[in-house]
Image (spheres, rainbow, N blue to C red):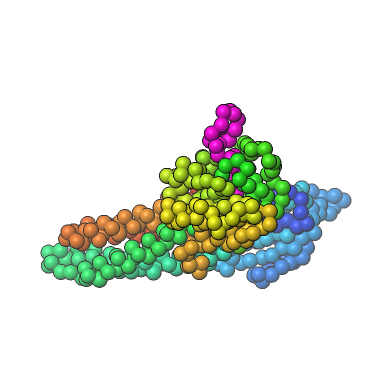
Amino acid sequence: MIQNDTICATATAQGVGALGIIRVSGQEAISISNEIFKGKDLTEVASHTVNYGFIVDSKLKTQNSETVIDEVMISVFKAPKTFTAEDLVEISCHGSPYIQQQIVELLIKNGARLALPGEFTQRAFLNGRIDLSQAEAVADLIAAENKASHEIALNQMRGGISSELQVLREQLINFTALIELELDFSEEDVEFANRQELKELVSSIKTKVTGLLTTFEYGNAIKNGVPVAIIGKPNAGKSTLLNSLLNEERAIVSDIPGTTRDTIEETLVIDGITFRFIDTAGIRETVDTIEAIGVGKAKEKVNSAKIVIHLYEEDLDILKELKPILEDKIVFNLLSKIDKNDWANDRYEMSLLKNYPNYHHFGISVKSGFNLDLLKQKLVQSIKSGIDENAVIITNMRHKEALQNAFESLENIASGMRIGLTGDLLAFHLRETLKHIGSITGQIDVDKDILGTIFGKFCIGK
């Protein structure tokens, strides 16, 4: 990446709006912007000021006057106290796509170039303004669709995971330095690194890494939405439940069994968490070819779901049939249409507790709304269970893989000390651990392909 040039791009979303913002960053950001600005001399104004004037094209003259493109406000930010740690200019203009395009073209004519996707944030990382995990959090913050994902991304952007990992790195670096110092005095047979202290440190860091890894499932669910499959026999009330949760007539409801033949998916945010509810075809034996396809799709959705809501009226045949693939799911086994059933005397009550002790069992009546709020409450609780919402939450697959690799290296250190591994091999595993932890924040030499993958997902202008 060439960083001695100046880049520009529209930072606001495409389309017509009241306002648009064009960003310019680099050594010549202020002087290039000044070339097309009629107002105060931008090279003389103080940093972090907003300046009123006009964008003009001095090369296109009409009756000896410049062609005015737009009336604007220009914010000037001087390095290093800017987002990119470079001189940065933001031009606030009217939101016409034509106006924005004209301004960008003028900037390019005067020496800037169009920024690549994510290049502003990439420069912030390369210039030491933020670390790699914070840069990734910028993209997560932009994509946040609910309160929970917003809070997690904001915490990470403020350095939540970075501060956690920095402490671990510093402790490991100290021991790595001591062990490598031992190698320089191998002939004297001295030991600078206390092996018992190293053993305790490795155990402590393993616990910390394990704790971070356990948050990934929750973090990933928050980030991408929690898939919830609603299953049951035909006419068990699945579509009615979906409609009630969404508070709209999304699925067709009919007394005719087998009305739903395909899956219907809709999202709903409950207490800051996005749930992706999937209404499925009634599961039963059928000779109808189309319905059979729908039943097959229903079982596929159960496989990919994190939560399964099973509605029943009379028997638990479906639970028995699907029990093997429900073992790693959160299952809500709900007696449907409780207004028509006697829950207290339900003959399945004892067998539920005996054969399905890990499931949530209660009755529900969508028609009257009985226990509908309880279902929503327990859905949220089942996702948040065991998670400290104030703790650092892992949402990024790259971070998870790096932590898993770090854990394996820590295991190698622990087992190596048990068998009396030599200092040079211990130092190797310590360096491997540092490499994996450092790869999360970019505190190592990061491969250009990795940077391209990360920042290529950003929008242009960010």
Q: In this view, does 174 lie to the left or right of 346?
A: left
- Say which quadrant the C terminus sits in: bottom right
The mark tally for this picture is: 0
Name the residue: 21% across, 68% down.
195
Q: Where is residue 299 in the image (x, y as percent from the top left)?
A: 51, 40
Magenta part of the chain: 272-296
Q: Position of residue 431 (x, y in %)?
A: 30, 59
Q: For residue 2, say whether it is visible.
A: no
Q: Is residue 213 left or right of residue 151?
A: left
Nearer the observer, 339 or 13? 339
Instruction: Classify 66 as above or below 251.
Output: below
Name the residue: 50% across, 52% down.
348
Name the residue: 31% across, 55% down.
408
Residue 176: say if magenta. Answer: no
Q: Position of residue 407 (x, y in %)?
A: 34, 57
Nearer the observer, 119 or 24? 119
Nearer the observer, 202 or 70? 202
Residue most toward the right?
63
Quarter occupied by residue 232 = top right
Q: Position of residue 163 (x, y in %)?
A: 45, 68
Name the residue: 59% across, 29% down.
288
Q: For residue 15, say whether it is visible.
A: yes
